[in-house]
Amino acid sequence: MSASLTIALDAMGGDNAPAIVVKGADFARRRFPDIRFHMFGDEKRILPLMKRRKRLSEITQITHTDNVISNEMKVSVALRKGRQSSMQLAINAVRDGEAAGVVSAGNTGALMAMAKLALRTLPGIDRPAIAAIFPTMRGESVMLDLGANVECAAENLVQFAIMGDVFARTVLGTVEPSCGLLNVGSEEMKGHAEIQQASAYLKDMSDTINFYGFVEGDDIAAGTTDVIVSDGFTGNIALKTTEGTARLIKEFLGDAFRSSMSSRLGYVFARRGLRKMRDRIDPRRYNGAMFLGLTGIAVKSHGGTDAFGFANAIGVAVDMAANGFNEKITDGLKKFGAVEPETREAAAS
Amino acid sequence: MSASLTIALDAMGGDNAPAIVVKGADFARRRFPDIRFHMFGDEKRILPLMKRRKRLSEITQITHTDNVISNEMKVSVALRKGRQSSMQLAINAVRDGEAAGVVSAGNTGALMAMAKLALRTLPGIDRPAIAAIFPTMRGESVMLDLGANVECAAENLVQFAIMGDVFARTVLGTVEPSCGLLNVGSEEMKGHAEIQQASAYLKDMSDTINFYGFVEGDDIAAGTTDVIVSDGFTGNIALKTTEGTARLIKEFLGDAFRSSMSSRLGYVFARRGLRKMRDRIDPRRYNGAMFLGLTGIAVKSHGGTDAFGFANAIGVAVDMAANGFNEKITDGLKKFGAVEPETREAAAS
């Protein structure tokens, strides 16, 4: 991380805000010694939490606001009534170049809408996407979109592929990341028109993007490709299905270890190994969904996370900022040139 | 099960056919003492497997054919060249009323297309759906469609809901099954137009169907509703994501138990409990995707299953046949009346 980098924090977003935000920031500053924070929220609630955190207080600026976006608030209401909200002000800090990125555990829809309006999309990107990192058999993959766009045109999917490619290179450190399009079968003729068209575009770009072809739902966890591209509807279902399945197995595993004295004893012996396993799929470790395609860095933390999880979301924002993620996407788009259909047709004629 | 019931088997479908088919049938006949089989396939390969299975031979009729549908075959080719295939002949046995249901572990697309053509859809059903049973925190749920229809109109989703409702009642034995529509959020305004429209239709049918509303990906494993309705694209992604996640966790769990001597010992003590857990989510136990909405019963076994899994797929076909599943769907459709948009409009005018 170069010199000092400021991250704007929506101190009031999330189920246990502002406590997890303050504590999470305190965790994060140990990992990133040069970090600085700008917190937005209710001073009366933030200041008492800062009292015993001398080091954190020294690197944190607090801007007070009473206005908070609730989880239940509709996006339209949030936009109208939340101009002075902790969420909006934190985003504005990025827009104004004062912070390198923003992290919020608040209302996803509101955060996306506000970030989109305040930060705008990067040139060449029509729609931003939500991305997250998934643990796989082969390491880690990034998947997008996870819910920003219920319906996507082929061009959107291609732009997601480019953003995912740059993300894998800059944040995951993957050399020549492979990219797959999420579909119901790997055969060429499967899936709907948008996916077919996106596949055709990506094949044409084979000298610059390592397009694997179609992947299926089980390829996500298998780690078949480093990047998985999907429309936001399907991606969101896949993400939440993964979470639900993991929770179910965890529950069943708990039942198994509680099922007899012998099993309880077995748990005691296997505990260290099991903890290591739990860490590998710990949702807190993978906390932090990135809004890609905006002119500023915005990371959404899970609303129910704890301080450890929130610190990881801050870590994602820092990684993206320190590695010049957005500059690299812009470079990537220039390189790919042929993203927008107009450009394609112009080139063909 | 009433008197004798014949199940037609595509002896040549699946990665390890005909061995798993013959062995699976032998397992199944122990569970269903009055069952009879009609196998279609290569006699030269089936007969040697029957040699030591005297009881099975007595209840099995074999019709020889050399024609086999491969997994790689395109649906159009399968339909054209497979008129005498083991798959097609097994389906025809159901069409001709000679068998109560058909089970195949072969090419899914070909099986669906052949079954649709030979068996046709039930009156009131525009498109058949693929359904499967999922283990959940609360027991078992049925989800459909899992891949027969990449795109679905609202009316299709409503028909799936009715079929799912009847399936939960007749096969799972659920009293008053609740039904959820898979979406990216539980808020009313979320999701695309078809889902919105389907939700409106289902709300209107509240006196006959127990519509819960929208459910998300993690609600599948949570067992929030007994029936989960989805278009075939999303449902297929959710199904395969579930499989992939379960496989990943199993792999990580194995690593955990192998990570130290202490963990290995822990495994030994916990083994019985862990086996019980494995049984609860054993994919072989949930083997057998049902093609719902056809005039005959057709069950698709996983291509890579073993004899135990294939026997369970046979079990699903027997359960559906013995419980008069199709008759009950037809009754259900009559009761719901208002399924087809024409009918709806006629009723309104």
Image: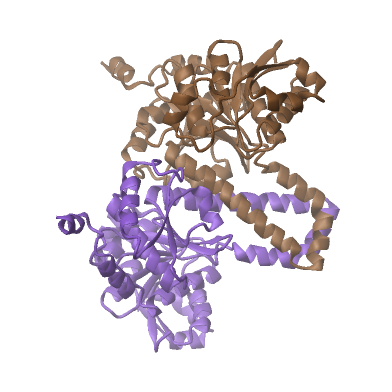
Chain colours: A purple, B brown
Q: Quadrant of the N terminus of chain B?
A: top right
Front residue of A323/B206: it is A323
Which residue is located at x 35 percent, y 71 percent? A297
Front residue of B312/A272: it is B312
Picture quadrant of residue B314: top right
Picture quadrant of residue B167: top right
**How many numbered marks are there?**
0
Front residue of A286/A172: it is A172
Residue A315, can we see it?
yes
Q: Quadrant of the C terminus of chain B?
A: top left
* Position of B114 relative to A117 (above/below): above
Q: Position of residue A300 (x, y in %)?
A: 42, 64
Residue B206, can we see it?
no
Q: Position of residue A256 (x, y in %)?
A: 75, 50
Q: Is residue B85 left or right of residue A199?
A: right
* Position of B176 relative to A13 (above/below): above
* Position of A109 relative to B47 (above/below): below
Q: Is residue B283 left or right of residue B266?
A: left
Which residue is located at x 71 percent, y 46 percent? B278
Q: Position of residue B96 (x, y in %)?
A: 55, 10
Q: Is residue A151 left or right of residue B67?
A: left
Q: Position of residue A24 (x, y in %)?
A: 51, 74
Which residue is located at x 32 percent, y 19 percent? B344
Picture quadrant of residue B45: top right
Which residue is located at x 48 percent, y 32 percent? B109
